[in-house]
Amino acid sequence: MLNVKDLIVFYENAIAVNDLSMEVREGQIVGVIGSNSAGKTTLMNTLSGLIWDMLIKEQRKGGERITVMGSVHFFEEDISKLPAFRRAQQGIVLCRERHPVFPDSSVTENLKIAGYLRKRAEVKQGIELSFDLFPNLARHRSRKAGFLSGGEQQMLAIGMAMMVGPKLLLLDEPLLGLSPAMQTQVVEAIKDVRRHTGVTLVIAEQFARPLLPWLDFAYVIENGMLTLTGPGPELMDNPEIKSAYFGV
Amino acid sequence: MLQGTLIYGFINSVVLMLVALGFSVTFGISGVANFAYGALYVMAGYLSWLGLHSLGLPYWLAAPGAVAITAGVAAMIYWFILLRVRGLVVSEVIATFGMGLAILELFRYLGFIGFEYTLPPLIDASVMIGDTYVDAQRLCIVGAGILLAAFLWFFTHYTKTGLAFRGIAQDERTALTLGINADKVAAWSVAFGAGYAALAALVILPLGTIAVNEGYNVLVNALAVCIVGGLGSTVGIIVASFLIGFAQILTATYLETSWMMLVSLVAILAILVIKPSGLFGHQKQLEERI
């Protein structure tokens, strides 16, 4: 479904993603595990095409030079140069880190805005599905999204990404900044979404413990480079992972 | 006297609201600066005058034509000028303000000054309300104001493009990941706002002559209403235009007519000191709370 080959991303002279190749098959749940500044977010932005928007904005400002090399193929088609909104139209949807919602719009409105590409009836169905999956959101449907708690905002962000109708859903640090109890809730919510829609998932995260057991395949990255790969449960038993991510 | 003040205060308020609506769509709701707004307003007036008098077109062709051309010019300003500096707010303001100056001063240079530059009223009659004479054009303004405000509210709450306007203003990157082509939507927003400016010009300008200076006044008034009401809030626009509108008429009646223009400026200053996000402001409300 998704093939990434020899991906390299530079910010000025600093290398953020270093010669990375990965593959995602249809129906899989794939994890990208790494600590802070490992290059997870840059990788997700490159997969979703947002990097091109950043590149253009930096150029306008005369700011940081961003360089992207390598290729990204989606269903055998080269999408390396496509901007983010085109990739979303093709079915690659990114849910960015730090629960990106529209803070001044109500919960329902957020979902409606997210339904930009869908037909009116589909938007209605999608909103109902989101409320079914996340009962918390249904309770706060007319509240401003900015007043929701972090966990609720994260669920809303996932609901918004699902409104687009993704074939491949990219989640960038869905557990970031959440309490352990909320983390468990969000993990359950992601599992629910998955059960309901069967969407293919790529999750970038540093809290490996709640995720690894159900990852079909995981890539562990450090300083932009792949260090370990393998099915999630297998990595659970890896001594390096244990010491680096579980503190054992 | 009092009755007349109330009626003319009401009409003046609706005029302000009409002038502010288009500016609010672009700058308030979508977050794209368009300070060529006043110039586009005046341009719509001159274009329909040219259509009527130089080309001899009937009104039903000249007026919509002027609206369409104004919106088209605004979209081109976005595509060829604003897009290069999009994301750098100060540059956006400077670029569009410069464009506005160029358009207005071009009209002055071409000699579009004088009393012959007037637009015909929609209905040439007057009615008595109580014991005050009100001409029908002013009633048309009130009607147009209500219609355009209602349509704007509907458009930004129930249509995809309208909802996308608010999406790109709040978080452009998130909008992009949701499949919204932010540049296209922003161009639509600039064109939509200019279309509103043109419609406002067509109903308001018949009250007087089309003058270059009107462009500057319109910009100041629109800015004042949007800032006082709070950027991005349609309700705020309505409330603020009534506050400023009545304040202007009361100033003209009881103090001095020439002080009318000061009211908007004082209103901008006062609101920036007391509540910078405006009376019904969304944009900065959350940040101020924290």
Image (spheres, rainbow, N blue to C red):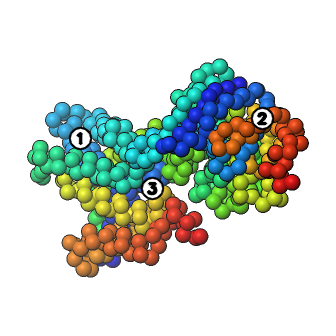
Q: CA distance from mark 1 to mark 2?
A: 67 Å
Q: Chain of mark 2?
A: A
What secondary structure is found at the residue carrying circle 2?
A: strand
State the quadrant of the C terminus of chain A: bottom right
For residue B284, say whether it is visible: yes
Give the class, few, some or many, for how many residues have Cα within 10 Å of label 2's Cα (few <14, many ≥20). some
Q: Residue at x 45, y 70 (%)?
A: B276
Tell me the mark number nearer the camera, choosing from 1 and 2.
Answer: 2
**Residue occupied by mark 1:** B47
Residue type at mark 2? Thr
* Disc 3 and disc 1 in contact, CB within 8 angstroms: no
For residue B131, say whether it is visible: no
**Residue occupied by mark 3:** B28
Left or right of B167? Residue A23 is right
Q: CA distance from mark 2 to mark 3?
A: 48 Å
Q: Quadrant of residue B28?
A: bottom left
Q: Nearer the viewer, residue B122 or A190?
A: A190
Q: Chain of mark 1?
A: B
Q: Nearer the viewer, residue B237 or A151?
A: A151
State the quadrant of the N terminus of chain A: top right
